[in-house]
Image (cartoon, helix red, strand yellow):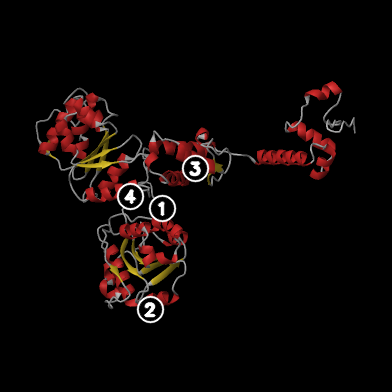
Amino acid sequence: MRETSHLSPVPAPAGAGLRLAASHGSTTPAAPAASDVVPTAVDTRVATRTLLYVARAPDDALVEHLKSRGWNVLVARSAHEVGRLIKPATVCAGIADMASFAVRELPGLEPSLRAQQVGWIALANAERLADPDVRRLIRHYCFDYVKIPVANATVDYLVGHAYGMVNLCDPDMPLDTTSASDDEMVGTCEAMQQLFRTIRKVANTDASVFISGESGTGKELTALAIHERSPRRKFPFVPINCGAIPHHLLQSELFGYERGAFTGANQRKIGRVEAANGGTLFLDEIGDLPMESQASLLRFLQEGKIERLGGHESIPVDVRIISATHVDLEDAMSDARFRSDLFHRLCVLRVDEPPLRARGKDIELLAHHILGKFKADNARKIRGFTPSAIEAMYNYHWPGNVRELINRVRRAIVMAENKLISAEDLDLAHFSEQQTTSLAQAREAAEKRAIEAALLRHRHRLNEAAADLGISRVTLYRLMGTHGLRDTSNDDKAGFKGDDKDLDASDQDARD
């Protein structure tokens, strides 16, 4: 992740656009062997065919059959195990027996199902297929599925097909892992899944894309994800923040200048537009673009040519424009601060970035991802977050979105004095109803409750209450003063000291 990045995207699901929608039953006729479907020579990245079999109770007969067909079968009985078995450089087939897992366990499989280097086939029964979450997992991440029980010949065909299809992926495309890397996006909520589907759709076209969203939601990472999944991915991705460059320098930054164009122009400079030739130009905060630069950009979009400042030559440039802003451009157009003709040129395709507060459980997922990335900043081994910290993160509005979450978690990692980050460490204590309690505080509270209960049982007769608690009457009297269970203002008047004398008002005992 770049230092300015604040989001880690979930990669495109494996086999996007290649999945089969049909279901297969156990009566499916025998199909060609997997090795006949995809020649071994197709895969130049791995020496043997690997298959991941994920099931709570693996079928030993199926494992032996797959091994007899030439598969190197790796068995995992949990989501954690399969996560460890998936390797970034290893292309493999996968069988996910969703019928063997409890429904509550299935969401834990989702990170592994996203891995693009695995061609997944799902096994499911009628009960599981009726579950909307299971249907979503199969629809988004699996090449195909089959109802159980299933014939071995059907499994042979399906895993061979999935293995062959995943091998058709461009070898120059980076393979995804179950753990998000620096330039990936993290998200499992429906809003993010919709965003990922939109990214995959717009990546395959060359039309201009406009990304709208609040500041800090990860608009640049979305633009980068579109670029890396597009046919232009082998060419440059050039970002420019239109709001961070002085207006009088923006023209030269965008379009470059010739030597001698102005005082100090000692040599030719290539502008950002020309530098992105063949690739993608990302114009961040496009709403801050001054009117004169808007006119120049509109002319370039219409003609596909630029002129360097001080030059007279028209230079053809082939770039795709992705723009983004947190400004409401419709309001800007109505106030004559943004050209409507430029807006319609830029906003051919629109992508809406969801705010963090609308992403539900992604807040906790992102917090743990950030913790894993930066926990080395503290010499202590930070292990996670307290329940109060999780509650506070869900209750907070997050006006700064993911960027603010990163800043708060990084600060908490440095400042935390315990192995779990608390709501106080995040500076969100007032957004949590659960107050953190130290061990000393817990002991003190338990001691006070025990004394109160003993006094109540014995109607404040100190001798009997002390015997019940297993302490002396003097100790009990002192602890009552410590916990505010007696009025100590009368002790001095009576000439008593709480540490060696006590008075039982209920039975009028004078002294011990």
**In the visual, does 324 lie left or right of 62?**
left
**In the visual, does 280 lie left or right of 485?**
left
Residue placed under numbered mark 3 in the picture: 390
Residue 68 badge: 2
Between tags 3 and 2, which lies in front?
3
Please identify the quadrant where the C terminus is shown: top right
Residue 436 badge: none
Mark closer to the chain start, 3 or 2: 2
Residue type at mark 1: give it.
Answer: Ser
Disc 3 and disc 1 in contact, CB within 8 angstroms: no
440 shown above or below 91: above
Residue placed under numbered mark 4 in the picture: 193
**In the visual, does 90 lie left or right of 352?**
right
Gap between marks 4 and 3 measured at Cα? 23 Å
Residue placed under numbered mark 1 in the picture: 179
Mark closer to the chain start, 1 or 4: 1
189 shown above or below 70: above
- Secondary structure found at label 3: helix
Classify 10 Å Cα crowding around label 2: few (below 14), some (14-19), many (20 and above): few
Residue type at mark 4: give it.
Answer: Gln
Mark closer to the chain start, 3 or 1: 1
Gap between marks 3 and 1 measured at Cα? 21 Å
Q: Residue at x 28, y 50 (%)?
A: 197
Q: Residue at x 42, y 45 (%)?
A: 366
- Secondary structure found at label 1: loop
Disc 4 and disc 3 in contact, CB within 8 angstroms: no
